[in-house]
């Protein structure tokens, strides 16, 4: 990926990697960028710089949020997984949504950390022997392999509660009513109507003969999309977005949430463990229903493009320069390699 | 226990069961009740009616908070443990503290449900094979024995997030600033500075030769007292308590939190599994350091009395009639049979 990118060139250059459908996609997406193209003085958007800056803010805030203090074992375990160098996609979505509606990065930062804490704890519990029994995560041994199962369970619980504590205690620059709403949204994205619902149905579906597209979408809407939706919506609320802006960004997030999972499924069958930094091909081993299994790899990739387009259509009402980070993040999710 | 009780007679009658130290305790506690004694028209406090009324409110609210809907398995698992007929001590403390500072039961009810959800999820995770590997809880097979380990982990996660969602979405009659503060307090009572810290240190201490009183108090201040403290403080904040009232009630809660664990340890060595509704004697089997092991049973009972007295001293500034529920709850915690 080039160092200096505007959304259009990002799309095209990354598109090229996947090959074959370049011109059609160019036509589709270029229509979204008309306003920016009409403004010759708008500077190109440097996506790489943006992601490095935001990841640095988030990593610094995460490290400060979980200090190395007594009891050392639990904090060490939390830090081990939290600071293992994830891509920080969710925090970036949160911050970008906040900035898009006129808020500051600092207002969204505690919520951005919270969604990463939730994401990390869901991986820690998902990797447990009684769940996926996974050995490798983000290129390192899984938490329970290092700290033991009981500590991995408890460190996950601690991260889950820390997410709420951090938002409640550290958020500045937003009215208390918005913070309460954000805490409710965050909670809903996790529980029996969110992430956990998706995980349970996913587990119960393994080895099932008849799993259709609707069933698969239920799993992914909950297991992956709910927290990605939460990430964007939290940022939009904290940034002071009005109801229409929050609704548009929620729809954007629903699309990229599903997009994220479609791409994940494709990567699981097309990449190696070394390339992914986690165990590849495990969906096949677990006999999981995935998009490639139901639709084939080519149609899955087309679905990803459609979802990306629908997502970006939600951003048309915003100033293109301000929307550039979310457009680039959507493209990144669509065309990432791991 | 008689049906109609005022705090003084509660104390004396229950005291009698433990025998031997009646007159000394009567002197200690009667001083706390002077104001009430001076008011001959204040009606006696019916503790049994109070606990039945509050438990009914809480049970109804808990059942409504976790509906039987898709995915059924996760909601069924959550309801199985949540509606298994616990004593609802934490919700009652929350409601009583709210009412004591002038708030309504309805304002505290979502937070009261939340602390019970947290308590339940901590038991579910504590009972897992990788932790205490327990078979019996509240007189029924433990959650993972019925629903499987993976569902028990996830249902615990879902209850944890539901606790926050419920407070954020359902609390009425309190300013948003107070709700944010309450959500922060609730989270702090759980995580790496609360319940989870206590559990981790507890697990790491099993079989350790040298565990002193200070170490034991760290465990219990976190594992048990933190959430009991949270329960009381949440109610006090939501009820509109001022800083002095919240501080007094926090100290009350810290004392009864430790009291609760001292009594739990004593019950573990003096009662049968059938009487407790959970596996008795398991502290001995796990070679855990407990108050009876460190201090002996008699001195542990004396410590319980001292903690109860210190707790009740914090309530002296409140009108005795209004403080009656918390006094009775403290006595109940001190002199319960299971």
Image (cartoon, coloured by chain):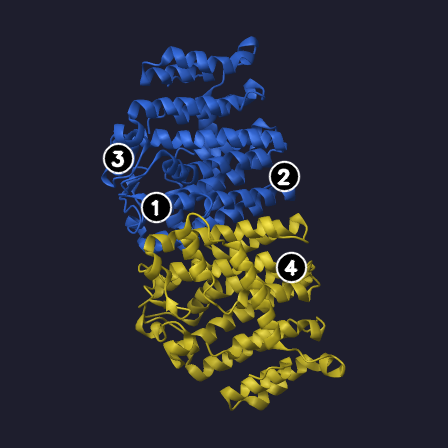
Chain colours: A blue, B yellow
Report helix, strand or loop for mark 1: helix
Mark closer to the chain start, 2 or 3:
2
Residue tagged 2: A174
Mark 2 or 4, closer to the camera: 4
Q: Quadrant of the N terminus of chain A?
A: top left
Tell me the CA gap for discs 2 and 1. 33 Å
| Left/right of residue A312 with respect to residue B170 in the rendered view | left
Q: Residue most toward the left?
A: A285
Report helix, strand or loop for mark 4: helix
Q: Residue at x 60, y 28 (%)?
A: A101
* Res. A210 visible in picture: yes
- Residue A19 x %, y %: 32, 15
Residue tagged 4: B106
Q: Chain of mark 2?
A: A
Q: Chain of mark 4?
A: B
- Decide: few, some or many residues near mark 1? Use Cα within 10 Å; few <14, some 14-19, many ≥20: some
For the residue pair B36 and B304, the one nearer the viewer reads as B36
- Residue A169 x %, y %: 57, 47
Residue tagged 3: A280
Q: Do discs 2 and 3 share a chain?
A: yes
- Decide: few, some or many residues near mark 4? Use Cα within 10 Å; few <14, some 14-19, many ≥20: some
Q: Is residue A263 above or below residue B176?
A: above
Residue tagged 1: A126
């Amino acid at each position: 990926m080039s160092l200096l990118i505007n959304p259009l060139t990002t799309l095209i250059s990354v598109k090229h990697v996947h090959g074959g459908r370049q011109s059609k996609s160019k036509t589709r997406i270029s229509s979204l960028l008309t306003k920016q193209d009409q403004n010759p003085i708008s500077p190109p958007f440097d996506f790489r710089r943006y992601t490095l800056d935001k990841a640095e803010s988030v990593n610094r805030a995460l490290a400060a949020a979980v200090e190395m203090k007594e009891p050392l074992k639990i904090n060490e375990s939390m830090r081990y997984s939290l600071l293992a160098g994830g891509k920080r996609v969710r925090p970036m979505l949160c911050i970008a949504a906040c900035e898009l509606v006129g808020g500051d990065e600092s207002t969204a930062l505690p919520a951005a950390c919270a969604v990463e804490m939730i994401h990390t704890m869901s991986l820690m519990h998902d990797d447990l022997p009684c769940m996926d029994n996974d050995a490798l995560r983000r290129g390192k041994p899984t938490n329970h392999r290092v700290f033991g199962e009981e500590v991995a369970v408890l460190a996950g619980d601690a991260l889950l509660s820390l997410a709420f504590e951090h938002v409640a205690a550290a958020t500045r620059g937003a009215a208390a009513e918005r913070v309460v709403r954000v805490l409710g949204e965050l909670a809903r994205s996790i529980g029996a109507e969110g992430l956990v619902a998706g995980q349970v149905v996913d587990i119960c579906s393994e080895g099932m003969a008849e799993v259709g597209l609707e069933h698969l979408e239920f799993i992914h809407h909950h297991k992956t999309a709910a927290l990605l939706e939460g990430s964007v919506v939290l940022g939009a609320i904290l940034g002071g977005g009005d109801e229409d802006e929050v609704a548009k960004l929620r729809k954007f997030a629903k699309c990229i949430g599903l997009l994220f999972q479609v791409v994940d499924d494709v990567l699981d069958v097309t990449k190696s463990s070394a390339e992914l930094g986690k165990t590849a091909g495990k969906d096949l081993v677990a006999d999981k229903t995935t998009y490639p299994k139901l639709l084939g790899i080519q149609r899955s990739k087309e679905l990803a493009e459609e979802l990306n387009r629908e997502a970006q259509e939600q951003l048309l009402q915003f100033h293109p320069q301000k929307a550039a980070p979310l457009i680039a993040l959507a493209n990144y999710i669509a065309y990432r390699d791991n």
